Image (cartoon, rainbow, N blue to C red):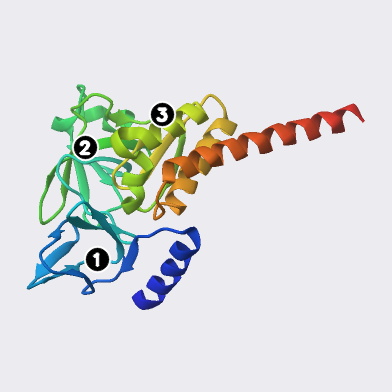
Amino acid sequence: MIAKEKAEEKEIVEKKGANREIVIPGETIVSGSDFLPGEGTRREGEEIVSLKFGLADKSDRLIKIIPLSGIYMPRRGNTVIGRVVDVLFNGWLIDIYAPYSSFLSLKECSKFVSRNDLAEAQDIGDMVITKVFSVKRKGVDLTTKSRGLGKLENGRIIYINSNKVPRIIGKEGSMINLIKEESKCNIIVGQNGVIWIKGNTLEEEIFAEKAIRFVAEKSFIEGLTEKTKEWFEEEKKKSKAEKKEVKKEEKK
Protein backbone atom coordinates (compact mmCIF):
# COMPACT_ATOMS: atom_id res chain seq x y z
CA MET A 1 0.00 0.00 0.00
CA ILE A 2 2.80 2.41 0.96
CA ALA A 3 4.69 1.57 -2.23
CA LYS A 4 1.55 2.34 -4.26
CA GLU A 5 1.08 5.66 -2.43
CA LYS A 6 4.71 6.52 -3.06
CA ALA A 7 4.36 5.85 -6.78
CA GLU A 8 1.22 7.99 -7.01
CA GLU A 9 2.76 10.88 -5.05
CA LYS A 10 5.99 10.66 -7.05
CA GLU A 11 4.05 10.92 -10.30
CA ILE A 12 2.26 14.05 -9.02
CA VAL A 13 5.52 15.64 -7.85
CA GLU A 14 7.23 14.98 -11.17
CA LYS A 15 4.33 16.54 -13.05
CA LYS A 16 4.59 19.67 -10.92
CA GLY A 17 8.34 19.93 -11.40
CA ALA A 18 9.25 19.64 -7.71
CA ASN A 19 12.76 18.38 -6.97
CA ARG A 20 12.08 16.89 -3.54
CA GLU A 21 12.27 13.12 -3.41
CA ILE A 22 9.49 10.89 -2.08
CA VAL A 23 10.81 8.39 0.46
CA ILE A 24 9.36 5.58 2.57
CA PRO A 25 10.38 4.31 6.05
CA GLY A 26 13.73 2.51 5.94
CA GLU A 27 14.80 4.04 2.64
CA THR A 28 18.31 5.50 2.38
CA ILE A 29 18.23 9.19 1.46
CA VAL A 30 21.97 9.94 1.23
CA SER A 31 25.26 8.30 2.11
CA GLY A 32 28.38 9.88 3.58
CA SER A 33 29.09 12.47 6.25
CA ASP A 34 28.22 15.60 4.24
CA PHE A 35 24.66 15.73 5.61
CA LEU A 36 23.14 15.72 9.11
CA PRO A 37 19.95 13.80 10.10
CA GLY A 38 16.98 16.02 10.96
CA GLU A 39 13.36 15.38 11.94
CA GLY A 40 12.00 12.10 10.59
CA THR A 41 15.44 10.63 9.82
CA ARG A 42 18.29 8.82 11.56
CA ARG A 43 21.88 7.92 10.78
CA GLU A 44 22.74 4.26 10.27
CA GLY A 45 26.47 4.00 9.76
CA GLU A 46 27.31 6.17 6.74
CA GLU A 47 23.69 6.43 5.62
CA ILE A 48 20.83 8.76 6.58
CA VAL A 49 17.59 6.75 6.58
CA SER A 50 13.97 7.91 6.48
CA LEU A 51 11.69 7.07 9.42
CA LYS A 52 8.52 8.33 7.72
CA PHE A 53 6.64 8.32 4.43
CA GLY A 54 7.11 11.80 2.96
CA LEU A 55 9.33 14.27 1.15
CA ALA A 56 13.07 14.35 1.81
CA ASP A 57 13.92 18.02 2.25
CA LYS A 58 17.59 19.01 1.98
CA SER A 59 18.29 22.40 3.52
CA ASP A 60 21.99 23.29 3.66
CA ARG A 61 23.47 20.18 5.31
CA LEU A 62 20.32 19.17 7.19
CA ILE A 63 17.95 16.50 5.89
CA LYS A 64 14.41 16.22 7.27
CA ILE A 65 11.19 14.54 6.21
CA ILE A 66 8.01 16.47 5.41
CA PRO A 67 5.29 13.87 6.17
CA LEU A 68 2.60 13.21 3.57
CA SER A 69 0.37 11.11 5.80
CA GLY A 70 -0.21 10.19 9.42
CA ILE A 71 -2.30 11.16 12.45
CA TYR A 72 -1.84 13.99 14.90
CA MET A 73 0.33 13.22 17.94
CA PRO A 74 -0.12 15.82 20.70
CA ARG A 75 2.85 17.71 22.13
CA ARG A 76 3.00 20.00 25.14
CA GLY A 77 2.39 23.61 24.09
CA ASN A 78 0.45 22.75 20.92
CA THR A 79 -2.57 24.93 20.18
CA VAL A 80 -5.44 22.67 19.12
CA ILE A 81 -9.12 22.96 18.28
CA GLY A 82 -11.42 20.26 19.62
CA ARG A 83 -15.07 19.32 20.08
CA VAL A 84 -16.68 18.86 23.50
CA VAL A 85 -17.92 15.25 23.69
CA ASP A 86 -18.91 15.05 27.36
CA VAL A 87 -19.47 17.30 30.38
CA LEU A 88 -18.23 15.86 33.70
CA PHE A 89 -18.55 17.18 37.25
CA ASN A 90 -15.07 18.75 37.14
CA GLY A 91 -14.45 19.54 33.48
CA TRP A 92 -14.96 18.54 29.86
CA LEU A 93 -13.86 15.66 27.66
CA ILE A 94 -12.69 17.12 24.34
CA ASP A 95 -11.99 15.30 21.11
CA ILE A 96 -8.84 16.83 19.57
CA TYR A 97 -8.72 14.15 16.83
CA ALA A 98 -5.73 12.38 18.36
CA PRO A 99 -5.21 8.79 19.57
CA TYR A 100 -5.61 9.90 23.21
CA SER A 101 -8.60 11.12 25.20
CA SER A 102 -8.31 14.79 26.19
CA PHE A 103 -9.55 16.55 29.29
CA LEU A 104 -10.06 20.23 30.11
CA SER A 105 -10.24 20.64 33.86
CA LEU A 106 -12.41 23.28 35.46
CA LYS A 107 -9.22 24.54 37.13
CA GLU A 108 -7.63 25.17 33.73
CA CYS A 109 -10.33 27.57 32.51
CA SER A 110 -9.34 31.17 31.79
CA LYS A 111 -12.36 32.50 33.71
CA PHE A 112 -14.37 31.36 36.70
CA VAL A 113 -17.01 28.74 35.96
CA SER A 114 -19.31 27.31 38.62
CA ARG A 115 -19.54 23.52 38.86
CA ASN A 116 -23.29 23.94 38.40
CA ASP A 117 -22.85 25.84 35.10
CA LEU A 118 -20.35 23.69 33.20
CA ALA A 119 -22.77 22.93 30.35
CA GLU A 120 -23.65 26.61 30.04
CA ALA A 121 -19.99 27.52 29.63
CA GLN A 122 -19.20 24.72 27.16
CA ASP A 123 -21.69 22.06 26.14
CA ILE A 124 -21.50 18.88 24.07
CA GLY A 125 -20.87 19.77 20.42
CA ASP A 126 -19.19 23.11 21.14
CA MET A 127 -15.84 23.77 19.46
CA VAL A 128 -13.06 24.99 21.74
CA ILE A 129 -9.54 26.27 21.08
CA THR A 130 -7.17 25.02 23.77
CA LYS A 131 -3.50 24.40 24.46
CA VAL A 132 -1.92 21.04 25.32
CA PHE A 133 -0.87 21.35 28.96
CA SER A 134 0.60 17.86 29.39
CA VAL A 135 0.70 14.50 27.61
CA LYS A 136 0.39 11.36 29.73
CA ARG A 137 0.08 7.66 29.01
CA LYS A 138 -3.66 7.71 29.67
CA GLY A 139 -4.48 10.96 27.93
CA VAL A 140 -3.92 14.65 27.33
CA ASP A 141 -4.56 17.53 29.70
CA LEU A 142 -5.70 20.81 28.14
CA THR A 143 -5.82 24.42 29.27
CA THR A 144 -7.49 27.65 28.16
CA LYS A 145 -5.38 29.85 30.46
CA SER A 146 -3.86 31.89 27.64
CA ARG A 147 -5.04 34.78 25.54
CA GLY A 148 -7.28 33.84 22.62
CA LEU A 149 -8.27 30.42 23.98
CA GLY A 150 -11.78 29.23 24.81
CA LYS A 151 -15.10 28.51 23.15
CA LEU A 152 -15.40 29.41 19.47
CA GLU A 153 -18.54 31.24 18.44
CA ASN A 154 -20.10 30.82 14.97
CA GLY A 155 -17.71 30.52 12.03
CA ARG A 156 -16.84 27.50 9.92
CA ILE A 157 -14.80 24.43 10.92
CA ILE A 158 -12.74 22.48 8.40
CA TYR A 159 -10.33 19.57 8.78
CA ILE A 160 -7.00 18.87 7.07
CA ASN A 161 -4.18 16.41 7.66
CA SER A 162 -2.18 17.76 10.62
CA ASN A 163 1.04 17.20 8.67
CA LYS A 164 -0.08 19.93 6.25
CA VAL A 165 -0.38 22.55 9.03
CA PRO A 166 3.19 23.95 8.70
CA ARG A 167 2.55 24.67 5.01
CA ILE A 168 -0.81 26.29 5.76
CA ILE A 169 0.87 28.57 8.30
CA GLY A 170 4.03 29.22 6.24
CA LYS A 171 7.31 30.74 7.37
CA GLU A 172 6.60 33.17 10.22
CA GLY A 173 2.89 32.98 9.35
CA SER A 174 3.37 34.21 5.78
CA MET A 175 0.93 31.80 4.12
CA ILE A 176 -1.93 32.09 6.60
CA ASN A 177 -1.56 35.88 6.66
CA LEU A 178 -1.85 35.90 2.86
CA ILE A 179 -5.05 33.83 3.05
CA LYS A 180 -6.49 36.07 5.79
CA GLU A 181 -5.74 39.20 3.77
CA GLU A 182 -7.21 37.89 0.52
CA SER A 183 -10.31 36.31 2.08
CA LYS A 184 -10.90 39.02 4.71
CA CYS A 185 -11.48 36.26 7.27
CA ASN A 186 -10.30 35.62 10.78
CA ILE A 187 -8.64 32.19 10.75
CA ILE A 188 -7.26 30.03 13.57
CA VAL A 189 -5.20 26.97 12.61
CA GLY A 190 -5.00 24.21 15.19
CA GLN A 191 -1.87 22.11 15.09
CA ASN A 192 -4.12 19.04 15.05
CA GLY A 193 -5.40 20.02 11.59
CA VAL A 194 -8.68 21.56 12.72
CA ILE A 195 -9.20 25.08 11.35
CA TRP A 196 -11.74 27.75 12.33
CA ILE A 197 -12.78 30.37 9.76
CA LYS A 198 -14.94 33.41 10.51
CA GLY A 199 -15.78 35.98 7.83
CA ASN A 200 -18.37 38.72 7.41
CA THR A 201 -20.21 36.59 4.85
CA LEU A 202 -20.59 32.92 3.99
CA GLU A 203 -18.94 33.62 0.62
CA GLU A 204 -15.79 34.91 2.35
CA GLU A 205 -15.60 31.80 4.52
CA ILE A 206 -16.04 29.47 1.55
CA PHE A 207 -13.34 31.39 -0.36
CA ALA A 208 -10.93 31.04 2.58
CA GLU A 209 -11.68 27.30 2.77
CA LYS A 210 -10.96 26.88 -0.96
CA ALA A 211 -7.61 28.66 -0.51
CA ILE A 212 -6.64 26.49 2.47
CA ARG A 213 -7.53 23.30 0.62
CA PHE A 214 -5.53 24.48 -2.39
CA VAL A 215 -2.43 24.94 -0.21
CA ALA A 216 -2.99 21.59 1.51
CA GLU A 217 -3.32 19.82 -1.83
CA LYS A 218 -0.15 21.45 -3.21
CA SER A 219 1.83 21.26 0.03
CA PHE A 220 4.57 19.10 -1.52
CA ILE A 221 5.62 21.58 -4.23
CA GLU A 222 8.26 24.31 -4.05
CA GLY A 223 7.42 27.97 -4.61
CA LEU A 224 4.03 27.42 -2.98
CA THR A 225 3.56 31.04 -1.92
CA GLU A 226 3.88 32.27 -5.52
CA LYS A 227 1.57 29.50 -6.74
CA THR A 228 -0.99 30.54 -4.14
CA LYS A 229 -0.76 34.19 -5.17
CA GLU A 230 -1.36 33.11 -8.77
CA TRP A 231 -4.35 31.05 -7.61
CA PHE A 232 -5.85 34.09 -5.89
CA GLU A 233 -5.46 36.17 -9.06
CA GLU A 234 -7.16 33.47 -11.14
CA GLU A 235 -10.01 33.17 -8.64
CA LYS A 236 -10.54 36.95 -8.68
CA LYS A 237 -10.73 36.93 -12.49
CA LYS A 238 -13.26 34.08 -12.39
CA SER A 239 -15.34 35.94 -9.81
CA LYS A 240 -15.41 39.13 -11.91
CA ALA A 241 -16.38 37.17 -15.02
CA GLU A 242 -19.19 35.40 -13.16
CA LYS A 243 -20.55 38.71 -11.83
CA LYS A 244 -20.56 40.16 -15.36
CA GLU A 245 -22.53 37.17 -16.61
CA VAL A 246 -25.05 37.55 -13.80
CA LYS A 247 -25.55 41.24 -14.68
CA LYS A 248 -26.05 40.36 -18.35
CA GLU A 249 -28.70 37.79 -17.41
CA GLU A 250 -30.45 40.31 -15.15
CA LYS A 251 -30.64 42.87 -17.99
CA LYS A 252 -32.31 40.37 -20.38
Q: Is residue 231 above or below residue 163?
A: above
Label 3, residues with CA under 10 Å away: few <14, some 14-19, many ≥20: few
Circles 3, 2 touching at the beta carbon (< 8 Å): no
Q: Nearer the viewer, mark 3 or mark 2?
A: 2
According to the image, label 2 marks what residue? Answer: 131
Please indicate whether residue 27 sits to the left or right of residue 216 in the image: left
> Which disc number belongs to residue 112?
none
Question: Between disc 1 and disc 2, whose residue precedes?
Answer: 1
Task: Look at the image and tell me whether residue 124 can be seen.
Answer: no
The residue that appears at 46% across and 59% down in the rendered structure is: 17
Question: Between disc 3 and disc 2, whose residue precedes?
Answer: 2
According to the image, label 1 marks what residue? Answer: 52
Label 1, residues with CA under 10 Å away: few <14, some 14-19, many ≥20: many
Q: Using the rendered view, name the quadrant where residue 105 is placed.
A: top left
Residue nearest the observer in this picture, 252 or 92: 252
Amino acid type, callout 3: Glu
According to the image, label 3 marks what residue? Answer: 153
